[in-house]
Image: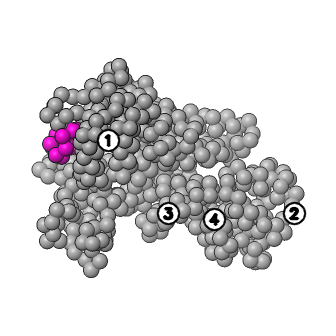
C-alpha cells in the first residue's frame, strides 16, 4: 500500500484491530517505549502523515529528545526500530492475532506496511528505496527473529571470550617480569526457569519467560554474560573455560501483599549460595502491578551493580594488585577497576586504570576507548576547560568517546561515558541526551541512574532527578558518595539546610567544588561556625573558583536558578565578599 494514501474505513478498522492485538501481546506490552513507537508510526500512516516519519521526528516525539537531536550521532531510533521489527516478526511467526490485516515494518524503513493476513509475502517498501536503505541513509542488516538473535549473540560472546582468553594473557606476559598473572574473567550466569508456586492457573503468566528476560537484560552489561539454562555442558567444564560461573534459579509464590519473586545465586562448581534477592509485586484487582520486564529489571539492578556479588572476587583481586605496575589489567578487571575508581577516586590509583584503557585501544576494545575518554575529560576538567590545555584534552576526550560509540553503538556503558565527557565539557543538554540513550539501552545500570539524576537536577528537572536518585539508592545497601549529590542539592534548594549539610559531607568527596559550595552555603544559612570554618578555606582555595569566580564557575553546570540562589545567598551569609562570589580572585 503506497505511502500517503487514504485508507477506507474497513481498512482502518482492520489495522486498528491489528494494532490493539499487537500492543496487548505480553512481550510488546512489557515495553512501553516500543509500544509508543509502534502506535506513533501506525497512526502516522493511517492519517496520511507517512512522509513526516523520520528518525528525527520519532526521536523528538516518541523518545523525548531535544530539538537539536542528530540521528547520525545518536542511533537510538535505529536501535529501537530493530527491536520493534524483531518483536513484530516473532508475533507473526507465532501466527497470533485475528485481525484481517498484519502490520509489517520493512527493513530499512520507519513507515509500516499493512498486509492482508492471507498475503504471506514479505513486505517491500513502496517509496522507491531498496530494502537495505534506511530512512537516514544508513545500511541496515536483514531482520532476525529474537530467538535466533539470542543464539547469534551467544555464539559471538563465546568467540569473543575464547579470543580474550587467547590474547589477553599474552598482554600480561609482555608486561610482567615474572610468570603470567591469572586475572579474573568475566562472570557467566546460567539462568534456569523460575518455579511458579502461586497455584495461579489464570491467563496472566507469572513466571513464563522471566528467565529469558533476565538473560537478555544481563547480557546488556559490558562486564557480564548470561545464558539460558537447560541441557547444557557440565558447569565445571564451563568454569574451566570461562572463569567464575554461577547458576541462578528462582521461584514465584504468594505473599501477604501479592506475589513474591525470589532468586538464588549459586557458585556453579560447588553449588554454594552466593546471594539471594527478592522482589515483591503487589496485586491490583488480582493482577500483578508490575510486568515480568519490570521484575527482571529489579533483579538486574542488583546483579549488575559494580558492588554486586558477581564482581566480589574481582574487586578483591584488584585491591590486592592495585599498587602494582604490572600486569596490565585485562578487559573485565579493567571494567571492574573503573567502577571502583568512580566510588573511591580519592584513594584509588587511576594509573592502572589508564594503562589498561590505553592498552585496550590496540585491541579495538570499545569500552577501553570509553574509559580513556572519561579519564582524559577528567584531566581536562582539572586543567580547566577555559584553558588551552583543558580545551585540547576535552576535544581529545570527545574523539575517544565517539570512537567508542562508533565501534559499539548499542553499548549503554559507552553512551554513559560519552555523557560524562559531555558533562565535564559543560555540555549539560548533550549529557542529558546521552544518559537518556544509555538507560534506554540498559536501564539496569545503577550507577548511571545516579549520574543521570545528577544531570537532571542541575537542569532543574527535579521530579525525574529524584525518581532516578531514589531508584539507585533503593538498590544499594552502602551506596557510593556520588549517590548523595541529588539528595544534598534537593535539600539545599528546599531550604532544609541541616539535611543539606548532613548529606553534603559525602557529596564533597564526589564533586569537591560543588560539594564544598553546598557545605559553605548550608553552614552560612545555619549560622554554623564549625561548618563554615571547615569548608570555607577549601572553597577559596579551589583553583576553578579562583580562576572564574565562584558563581560564574557554578553557572557552567547549575542551570536551576532557584538552586543557584540558595547556594549564593548561603555563601554570602557565610561571609564571602561579593567580589569573590562574582569575579575571579
Residue on which the image places disc 3? 467
Find numbered disc 1 in the image and state the secondary structure of the residue it sits on.
Answer: helix
Separation (CA) of disc 3 from disc 1 = 27 Å
Separation (CA) of disc 1 from disc 2 = 58 Å
Residue on which the image places disc 2? 577
Separation (CA) of disc 4 from disc 2 = 23 Å
**Residue for point 14% across, 52% down:** 230
Residue on which the image places disc 4? 489
Instruction: Determine which quarter of the picture holds residue 100.
Output: top left
Is residue 570 or residue 325 the one in the foreground? Answer: 570
| Colour scheme | one colour
Q: Is residue 174 left or right of residue 539?
A: left
How many residues crowd mark 2 within 10 Å: few (<14), some (14–19), many (20+)? few
Observer-side mark, 3 or 2, equals: 3
Specify start and end residues of the magenta stretch as a single range.
90-103
Residue on which the image places disc 1? 84
Q: Earlier in the sequence, mark 3 or mark 2?
A: 3
Q: Is residue 91 magenta?
A: yes
**Residue for point 71% across, 71% down:** 522
Separation (CA) of disc 4 from disc 3 = 14 Å
Q: Is residue 95 left or right of residue 305?
A: left
Q: Earlier in the sequence, mark 3 or mark 1?
A: 1
Instruction: Determine which quarter of the picture holds residue 58.
Output: top left
Amino acid at each position: 500500500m503506497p505511502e500517503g494514501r487514504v485508507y477506507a474505513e474497513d481498512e482502518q478498522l482492520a489495522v486498528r484491530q491489528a494494532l490493539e492485538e499487537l500492543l496487548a501481546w505480553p512481550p510488546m506490552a512489557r515495553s512501553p517505549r516500543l509500544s509508543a513507537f509502534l502506535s506513533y508510526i501506525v497512526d502516522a500512516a493511517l492519517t496520511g502523515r507517512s512522509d513526516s516519519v523520520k528518525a528525527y521526528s520519532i526521536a523528538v516525539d516518541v523518545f523525548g529528545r531535544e530539538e537539536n537531536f542528530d540521528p547520525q550521532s545518536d542511533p537510538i531510533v535505529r536501535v529501537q526500530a530493530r527491536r520493534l521489527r524483531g518483536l513484530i516478526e516473532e508475533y507473526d511467526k507465532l501466527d497470533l492475532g485475528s485481525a484481517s490485516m498484519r502490520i509489517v515494518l520493512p527493513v530499512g524503513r520507519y513507515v509500516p506496511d499493512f498486509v492482508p493476513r492471507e498475503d504471506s509475502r514479505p513486505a517491500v517498501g513502496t517509496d522507491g528505496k531498496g530494502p537495505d536503505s534506511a530512512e537516514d541513509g544508513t545500511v541496515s542488516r536483514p531482520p532476525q527473529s529474537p530467538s535466533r538473535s539470542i543464539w547469534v549473540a551467544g555464539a559471538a560472546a563465546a568467540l569473543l571470550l575464547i579470543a580474550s582468553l587467547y590474547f589477553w594473557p599474552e598482554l600480561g606476559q609482555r608486561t610482567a617480569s615474572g610468570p603470567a598473572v591469572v586475572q579474573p574473567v568475566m562472570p557467566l550466569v546460567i539462568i534456569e526457569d523460575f518455579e511458579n508456586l502461586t497455584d495461579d492457573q489464570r491467563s496472566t503468566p507469572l513466571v513464563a519467560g522471566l528467565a529469558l528476560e533476565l538473560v537478555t537484560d544481563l547480557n546488556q552489561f559490558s562486564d557480564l554474560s548470561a545464558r539460558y539454562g537447560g541441557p547444557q555442558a557440565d558447569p565445571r567444564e564451563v568454569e574451566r573455560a570461562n572463569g567464575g560461573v554461577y547458576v541462578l534459579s528462582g521461584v514465584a509464590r504468594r505473599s501477604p501483599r501479592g506475589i513474591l519473586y525470589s532468586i538464588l545465586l549459586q557458585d556453579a562448581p560447588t553449588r554454594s549460595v552466593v546471594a539471594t534477592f527478592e522482589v515483591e509485586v503487589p496485586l491490583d484487582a488480582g493482577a500483578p502491578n508490575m510486568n515480568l520486564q519490570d521484575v527482571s529489571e529489579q533483579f538486574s539492578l542488583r546483579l549488575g551493580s559494580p558492588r554486586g556479588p558477581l564482581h566480589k572476587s574481582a574487586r578483591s583481586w584488584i585491591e590486592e594488585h592495585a599498587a602494582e605496575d604490572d600486569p596490565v589489567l585485562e578487559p573485565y578487571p579493567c571494567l571492574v577497576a573503573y567502577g571502583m575508581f568512580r566510588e573511591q577516586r580519592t584513594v584509588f590509583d587511576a594509573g592502572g586504570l589508564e594503562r589498561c584503557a590505553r592498552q585496550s585501544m590496540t585491541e579495538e576494545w570499545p569500552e577501553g576507548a570509553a574509559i580513556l575518554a572519561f579519564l582524559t575529560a577528567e584531566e581536562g576538567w582539572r586543567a580547566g576547560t577555559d584553558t588551552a590545555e583543558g580545551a585540547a584534552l576535552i576535544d581529545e576526550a570527545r574523539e575517544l568517546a565517539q570512537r567508542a560509540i562508533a565501534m559499539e553503538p548499542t553499548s549503554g556503558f559507552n553512551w554513559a561515558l560519552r555523557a560524562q565527557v559531555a558533562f565535564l565539557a559543560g555540555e549539560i543538554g548533550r549529557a542529558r541526551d546521552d544518559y537518556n540513550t544509555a538507560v534506554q539501552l540498559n536501564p539496569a545500570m545503577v550507577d548511571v541512574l545516579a549520574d543521570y539524576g545528577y544531570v537532571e537536577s542541575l537542569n532543574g528537572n527535579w521530579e525525574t532527578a529524584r525518581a532516578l536518585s531514589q531508584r539507585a539508592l533503593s538498590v544499594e545497601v552502602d551506596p557510593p558518595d556520588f549517590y548523595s549529590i541529588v539528595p544534598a542539592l534537593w535539600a539545599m534548594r528546599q531550604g532544609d539546610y541541616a539535611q543539606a549539610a548532613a548529606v553534603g559531607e559525602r557529596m564533597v568527596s564526589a564533586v569537591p567544588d560543588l560539594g564544598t559550595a553546598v557545605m559553605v552555603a548550608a553552614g552560612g544559612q545555619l549560622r554554623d561556625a564549625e561548618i563554615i570554618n571547615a569548608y570555607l578555606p577549601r572553597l577559596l582555595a579551589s583553583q576553578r573558583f579562583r580562576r572564574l569566580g565562584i558563581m560564574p564557575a557554578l553557572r557552567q553546570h547549575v542551570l536551576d536558578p532557584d538552586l543557584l540562589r540558595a547556594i549564593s545567598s548561603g555563601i554570602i551569609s557565610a561571609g564571602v565578599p561579593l567580589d569573590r562570589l562574582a569575579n575571579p580572585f
